[in-house]
Image (spheres, rainbow, N blue to C red):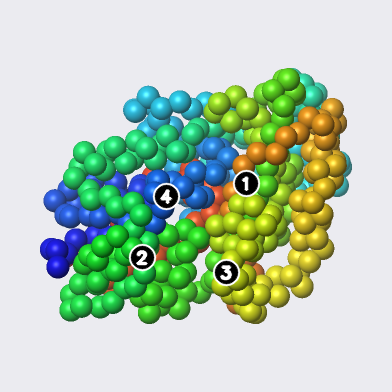
Amino acid sequence: MDTPYDFVVIGGGIVGLSTALSLTERWPNKSIAVLEKESKWAFHQTGNNSGVIHSGIYYEPGSLKARLCKAGCESIIQFCEEHKLPYERCGKLIVATSDDEIPALEAIYQKGLKNGTDVVQVTAAEAKEIEPHVKCVQALHVKTTGIVGYRAVCEKFVELLQAKGVDLFLNARVNNITEAGETQVIETSQKTLRGRFIVNCAGLFCDRIAKKLGLNPPAKIVPFRGEYYELKPEKRYLVKTLIYPVPNPEFPFLGVHFTKMIDGSIHAGPNAVLGFKREGYKKTDIDLIDLGETLTYPGFWKLVFKYGDEGLKEMWRSLSKARFAKSLQKLIPEVTADDLVPTHAGVRAQALRPDGSLVKDFIILEEARSLHVINAPSPAATSSIEIGKEIVSRIKVA
């Protein structure tokens, strides 16, 4: 068998690739391998990301999300500038469309101030100067929010890793992991290799990888499919930047919103519905094992009991384009169902605890010979460079 690698990173999305890059910077003489089960890098969550560079305004002050997103916003922009990757710091509006949403908007503003976010309160008239077609009673203008193509960022990560001598394996699904003295034997669909330390960045399958190492993760990954529409080209003038509603503070999703993409298109969404397959991007995608795991998990039914009404609204919006358009009209009344065409969907790897609570912060499990990123949904792409640094700072090796 081959000489063991010092580090094996499982998962070739933006977090796994960034982590591998951080490992090379901390330990330039260590041997590193990255395993990705697909034929392309950044194929799932990263590749279907909306492309937003988040500011960190929403997250609980002092949390990993707040700290790593705030720093990550600057890191990802610095990386783009250094490597001449296209990005735009366009800013965004978070808008209250009725007076009863103002207290929640104020709470977001206070979080933003505590997190050091560049955010200002604006009146309805001032909001219209930024977005002429928006309807609101009050808003927040978050100046540091931007947009980028995260696939392009990952392509640059891969290029840098190759130059540093990291072994990159595509089509390498991890089937089994066993202990072998001071190393761990990792059997993949491509080859078997050994590693002294494993970093699990497997996204939608991170909990299953952790179980292969004998761990019992504190939460299970439950997939939520986010469906998007795109404004027809002739209606793109309606949106200049990003426009978000005031989110439900108890729900982990931000609500349907308008996002300017780096290619100039305008996406609207997502709604969030239960995925019947961990990597199911179509309504008809079903995996009986994935679905069975969800339906037999006690935490899922506790979640349904708590948020059943919200879930039904999301499902109804998924089935009705008119209903979807009605949600968007709260932000921009001129938008009609005829202005919308379906575009890509994404799947969010949401960690759910046995008590039915949705994990709101990143979870990083540290073991003697492995480290596991168990919950890293949005804003993981924005935070990716800083997550990589955080992971490396927690690894203690001889």
Query: Disc 2 and disc 1: Cα gap in Å?
Result: 25 Å
Q: Are marks 2 and 1 in contact (CB under 8 Å)?
A: no
Where in the figure is residue 184, as x and y percent of width and height?
Answer: 24, 72
Q: Can residue 157 be seen in this view?
A: yes
In terms of sequence position, does the residue under pointer 2 or pointer 1 come before the other?
2
Q: Residues within 10 Å of mark 2 (few under 14, many from 20)?
A: many
The amino acid pointed to by label 3 is Asp
Q: Which residue is drawn at 69% across and 34% down?
A: 230
In terms of sequence position, does the residue under pointer 3 or pointer 2 come before the other?
2
- Which is closer to the viewer, label 4 or label 2? 2
Q: How crowded is mark 4: few (under 14 residues within 10 Å), some or many (20 or more)?
A: many
In terms of sequence position, does the residue under pointer 4 or pointer 3 come before the other?
4
Q: Is residue 14 visible?
A: no
In terms of sequence position, does the residue under pointer 1 or pointer 3 come before the other?
3
Query: Disc 4 and disc 2: Cα gap in Å?
Result: 15 Å
Residue placed under numbered mark 3 in the picture: 290
Q: Residue at x 68, y 61 (%)?
A: 274
Where in the figure is residue 29, as x and y percent of width and height?
Answer: 14, 51
Q: Residue at x 20, y 42 (%)?
A: 164
With respect to residue 133, does 299 lie above or below? below
Query: Disc 4 and disc 3: Cα gap in Å?
Result: 21 Å
The amino acid pointed to by label 2 is Val
Judging from the image, what secondary structure is the residue with disc 1 in? Answer: strand
Residue placed under numbered mark 4 in the picture: 13
Residue placed under numbered mark 1 in the picture: 345
Judging from the image, what secondary structure is the residue with disc 3 in? Answer: helix
Q: Residues within 10 Å of mark 1 (few under 14, many from 20)?
A: many
The label number, if any, that marks residue 174 in the structure image: 2
In the image, 155 versus 310, the foreground residue is 155
